[in-house]
Amino acid sequence: MKKRKRFLQIMMAVSLAGGLLSGCGQAGGKAVPATQAASEQSETSEAQETTTAVQTAKTEEAKPVDVYVFIAASLKNTMEKIKENYESAHPGVNIIYNADSSGTLQKQIEEGAQCDIFFSAAPKQMNALKDGGLVEESSDTNLLVNKVVLIKPEGEKTAVTGFENITAASSLALAGEDVPVGQYARKLFTNMGILDQVMKMEINEGANVTAVLTAVAEGSNEVGVVYATDAASMPDKVEIIAEADKTKIDPAVYPVGLIKDKEASEDQKKAAAEFKKYLTSDESVMKLFTEAGFTKYTE
């Protein structure tokens, strides 16, 4: 019995020693002190936090800055090309356009719509915003000049040969009174002494110059009054009958300026100022405008 008891004690000791050796083997053959393990775990956690912070910073850095630009409808085609060129060279900037009549855009800005840059088809709207304290000091620049023209559908016949006998048309597409091209047209008719006769015509009043252009292009109206650049954008749809007499109408001047955007961040304000500078000083931009039919403003 004593021998059997001694044998069992030896076997238990061997078994216990084997278990300890196995545990050391699973730990890489070396026991790790508790303080060292805690330290290594802390360092790993800190490394993970640093990596996460760097990834977050990169994500924020990669997020483009939005610049809200309100543009007269007659500028839209050219401004889309400018946007494409600018964003290609400045991947951190996202240009967002709102194109409509300058009068409508003016009202939206006055009502608090977020806007960083206003590009108007007439000084009147820009001046109204300046008087209201909504334009950044000395930031507005007269940039372009456009012509007011009389058009008809391409290939269609009309007795109208110019603004002098415009009332010979069966119908007229004319922009509203708050739209610059509509204001220029009414001023022209007033100076010609025919405003009352014109306003008695069958008139299709457009919300902006694009609506007038479309009405004539589709044949909905016999004639219409638009800018030369609009007519040039649809050479296969409309034909210019005549240009407005320069002695009877002020030039269609296009000013661009920075708007006081209360919602804009400092990065957004900086991006807006840089884009406005690009519009007014880059030769490639002016080339696109002149190709579209605009001329550069000169004093």
Image (tube, helix red, strand yellow):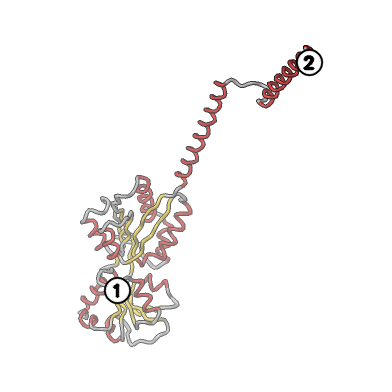
Disc 1 marks which amino acid?
Ala
Report the front residue among 260 and 52: 52
Which element is circle 2 on?
Answer: helix
Residue 148 % position (x, y): 31, 72
Residue 248 horizontal side relative to residue 155, left or right: left
Q: Look at the numbered disc 1 and give the secondary structure of its residue.
A: strand
Report the quarter where the C terminus lies. Answer: bottom left
Residue 191 occupies which quadrant of the picture? bottom left
Q: Give the residue type that dot 2 points to.
A: Arg
Q: Position of residue 28 (x, y in %)?
A: 67, 25
Task: Please report contact status of discs 2 and 1: CB closer than 8 Å, yes or no.
Answer: no
Answer above or below: position of 102 versus 27: below
Report which residue position mark 2 lands on.
4
Q: Earlier in the sequence, mark 2 or mark 1?
A: 2
Q: Nearer the viewer, residue 11 or 121?
A: 11
Residue 211 coordinates in the image, percent (x, y): 35, 73
Camera-side residue of 182 and 193? 182
Q: Nearer the viewer, mark 2 or mark 1?
A: 2
Q: Is residue 109 above or below residue 237?
A: above
Residue assigned mark 1: 175
Horizontal placement of 6 versus 199: left or right? right
| Crowdedness near tag 1: few (<14), some (14–19) or many (≥20) residues, C-alpha within 10 Å | many
Of residues 297 and 207, the one drawn nearer to the viewer in this rendering: 207
Q: Residue furthest top?
A: 2
Q: Please provide percent x and percent y for residue 237.
A: 43, 78
